[in-house]
Image (cartoon, rainbow, N blue to C red):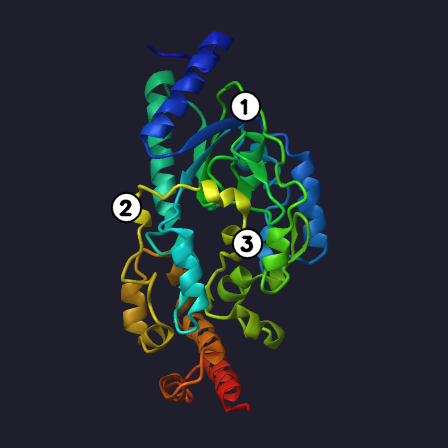
Amino acid sequence: MTIPKNVSPDQAFELAETIKHWGNELGFQQIGITDIELSDAEGHLTKWLEAGFHGEMDYMERHGSKRSHPEELVPGTIRVISARMDYLPEPRALMHEHLEDPLDAYISRYALGRDYHKLMRGRLQKLASRIEAVVGPYGYRVFSDSAPVLEKALAAKAGLGWIGKHTNLIHRQAGSWFFLGEIYTDLALPIDSPVKDNCGTCTACLDICPTQAIVAPYQVDARRCISYLTIELHGPIPVEFRKALGNRIYGCDDCQLVCPWNRFAQMTDETDFMPRHGLETAQLIELFMWDEQKFLQRTEGSAIRRIGYERWLRNLAVALGNASHNGEVVAALLAKENDSSDLVREHVRWALDCHNSP
């Protein structure tokens, strides 16, 4: 049966339910649909940018109002199909163990497997194509953290959860360990209702943040955030934050680890999100001794590769400076003391000073 774009209310409801069913078949844990009215989110974004909380992430300022006006980014858009896919690769207890071992290299768990951008966009394209097979040609475009899109605001409006005090999306039965993706479309589908904020009086995420980057409930100063410092920041990591990084070399999961709602999070069944090359148990010294070729080989198809080899060594040098003092750690640092990169040398010197201090 072919359903035209200008569907009746009954047909639109049937199509929306079918889309959600297809989404589940394609590996998404939830699909929601929303309109494109984002004035509240636009106001929040404007204040965040004016405060300078975005740091060097200049792309957050680009594209004018397209981020908060989907119809400007993709003309004709009137609805957004929002999808979430769980990625939790291991129990939280194991993550705590790795964080507590100063010689372990802690990588944010979303980045241990295949780069989620490609997987999410591929699945969303399959969903969009299924819709096209039923309704005929229609206007759409798929996204997953790949364009000026207010993903969390749209997902919250679509009923996929609420934006928590750490600014991640939280689902009452699934926590926050999931990726988001969208299909912008010109189909007049029925919209879902948002869910209420269930953070209550809890401040666990604010209290646990190693760098106190959550400066107020629902406000993150990215310039202080370990994810920003280890991934987005291109230059030196500010000295005042280096100790707080601990053994975190790519991203940070602390605010999610402590969130009470994540006791309901489910382990992923998606094999592409499973850890590769033993990165979930890797040691700092082992990774620090990789040459650039090995770095490129071991991070092929991974989100980690985006920071490049120089920043990879920068982050590891800081973590080694925070590691327990022993001869192997110092020897590893000395091996890079004369690295060709000014950035790496500076962080290695800092790390060696940490071990030389009484």
Disc 1 versus disc 2: distance between alpha carbons? 30 Å
- Circle 2 crowding by C-alpha within 10 Å: few under 14, some 14–19, many from 20: few
Sequence order check: which comes first, mark 1 or mark 2?
Answer: 1
17 shown above or below 344: above
Report the amino acid beneath label 2: Thr
305 relative to 241 in the view: left or right: left
- In percent of the image, x 52 and y 18: which residue is there? 190
Looking at the rendering, in which quadrant would you find the C terminus?
bottom right
Residue 312 vertical placement versus 171 (above, below): below
Identify which residue is drawn at 72% across, 49% down: 47
Residue 271 is marked as 2
Helix, strand or loop status at disc 3: helix
Reading the chain from its start, which is encountered first: label 3 or label 1? 1
What amino acid is labelled 3 in the image?
Answer: Cys
**Residue placed most toward the observer, 286 or 290:** 286
- Location of mark 3 (residue): 255
Residue at 41% x, 87% y is 330
Question: From the image, which quarter does the N terminus lie in?
Answer: top left
Left or right: 168 in relation to 48: left
Q: Which mark is residue 192?
A: 1
